[in-house]
Image: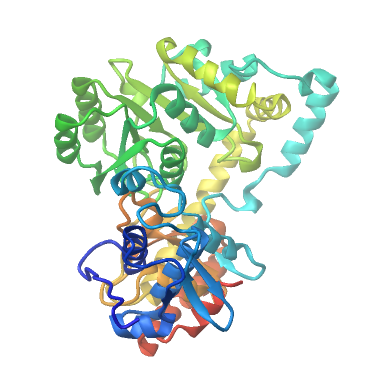
Amino acid sequence: MSEFTIPLNRDSEEPIYRQLIRQIKMQIESGSLTPGTRLPASRDLAKSLDISRISVVNAYAELRAEGYLSAHAGRGTFVSRDVHPAGGQQHTGSAETQEEFAMPDSSLRDMMRLARRPGVINFSHGSPPMEFFPMSALRSALNTVLDRDGASALTYELAEGYTPLRNTVRDYVSALGIRCSADEVLITGGAQQAIDLVMQALVGEGQTIVTTNPTYLGVIDIARTRRLHIEGIPMDDDGIRLDHLENFLVDHAARLIYVQPSFQNPTGNIMPMHRRRQLLNLAHEYGVTVVEDGTYHEFRFEGESLLPLKAIDEHHNVIHISGFTKMLLPGMRIGYIISGNHYLERLVRVKLAADISTSGLNQRAIHLMIQRGVLAQALERNNRELQRRRDAALAAAKQYFPAGTTWTVPQGGLYLWARLPRHGPGAAELYVAALQRQVSFAIGSVFFTDGCGSHRMRLNYGLQRPELIEEGFRRIGETWHSLMDTEGDYDHAEKAQVL
C-alpha cells in the first residue's frame, strides 16, 4: 500500500478522522481503491501520516459501519466487495448531494452509548438528573387521574391535545409574556417531536433551514433524516451572527430559522434583547419563519429574565416550542407548539399522521401536576441545585483542565461548553481515552453542521453531584495530559471501539 496517500489539512476545523473518512470514501467511489484492496494497519497509517492512531481507528470503525470497509480477524481491513466504484455503498446522486443529505452520524452515537456503562461518570447526555424527578408527585397524579377518569384516560385524545392542558399552557406562557389562545396550542410528544412536526409541515425535501453553528444535535438529525439542507450560521457571545445570516438570506431561500435564545444547547449562551428584536426584524424582511426552542428558558439561576421571541413577535412570524417534561420527567414526553392558526392546521395534519395523539394519561398527569404547583416547586428547587453544580464545574475545570482550555460561564441551563487547547488531542481522541478512566462527555463536533468543533466538548454538569463533578473533571484533565505524554500511543482506545 505504498501508493495509498491521504491529503490532510491540519489547519482545518474539520477533525482529522472526518477528513480520513471523506478522503477514503472519495478514493473508493472514484475507483482508486478497488473492492478487496487491503488498507494499512491503523498503526502503520497513523505513523505514515504523522497523526494519532485513534483518528485512524475512528475512521476505520465508521467506514466499516457504513459498509465501505470490512475487517477480517488476523488478516486486516479491506475495501468491501459490496462497494462499486463511482457508486459507493448503494448511493445515488452526486457526491455533493450525498454530503448535503448526509444521514445522522451513527458511529458517534455508538460511542456515546458506552457512556451508559455502570460506573462511568457521565457528563454526555442532555437530560436532567434522575434525583430531580418528582416521583411521589407523579405517582399521586397518575392514581388521581385513573381514579377520576378511568378508562377514558387511556383512549385517544384529540390530535391538538387534552383541552384542559392546552388551557393550562395558554395560562402558563402568559406569565412568560406570550399571549395566545388555547386554539393556538398543540400538545406534542416532547419538544423533539414538536421540532420534527414543524419541519415536516413547513419544509419540503431539499429545501433549506438555517440554524446556529453549533446547534442542538436533534435539529441536525431531523434535517438529515428528512433530507433537508441545513445551514449553520456562526455564533458570537450574543447568539446567531446577523451579518452572516443576512449575507446567506440575500442569496438563498430559507424556509425556517431555528434558534434557542436562552441557554442555548450546547453553548449555554443567552441572546440579549436587542439581538432578539434584530433577528425578528431580519426574518420578517426576508419572509422567513423563526422557530424558537424555549426548552431551557426557565433553567435560569442568575441574570435577568428575558422575554421569549414569541412575546415580542409583532409580525406573527414565530413558532414557539417548549415542554414541561424536560423540567420534570423526560420520559413522559409532553411538549407543545404555539403557532398562529395559519400554521396550526398543517401541524395538526402531520401530528395525526405521526402518532394520532400524545398519550392521554401522561397529558392528564402533567396537567394535574402543574395545577398542584409541582412544576413551580421543582423549578425553584432544581435551579438552586443546578447553580451549585455549575459552581462546582467551574471550580473543577479551573483546577484540572489543561492550561489554555476556555469555557463559557452559564447563567442557567445544564451545560458547560469548553474548548481544549489546539496544540493537544481533540475531543474525539480524548473521549475514547477518557472512557477507559470511566468518564464521558459530549464531543463538540456533533453539534456543528459542517464538522467543525474538533476541540470542543459539552459537559452536562447537571447530571452529577459536586463531588462526582470534581472527580470526573479530574479524570478528564489527567486523560488529556496522559495523551500528550504518550504522543499517539492509543492502544487502549482501539480496544474501546469493540466494546
Q: Nearer the viewer, residue 267 or 254?
A: 254
Say left or right for 320 vs 406. Answer: right
Judge whether 436 appears above or below 252 on screen: below
Residue in the image at 78% along x and 23% along y: 154
Q: Nearer the viewer, residue 264 or 327?
A: 264
- State the image coordinates of residue 446 (x, y, percent, origin top left): 40, 55
- State the image coordinates of residue 203 (x, y, percent, origin top left): 38, 26
Say left or right for 236 vs 307. Answer: left
- State the image coordinates of residue 364 (x, y, percent, origin top left): 70, 24
Where, quadrant-wise, is the C terminus in this rendering? bottom right
Q: How many marks?
A: 0
Where, quadrant-wise, is the N terminus in this rendering? bottom left
Q: Nearer the viewer, residue 492 or 371?
A: 492
Residue in the image at 32% along x and 79% along y: 51
Q: Nearer the viewer, residue 108 or 380?
A: 108
Residue in the image at 40% along x and 80% along y: 40
- State the image coordinates of residue 436 (x, y, percent, origin top left): 55, 77
Q: Is residue 396 visible?
A: no
Say left or right for 378 vs 240. Answer: right
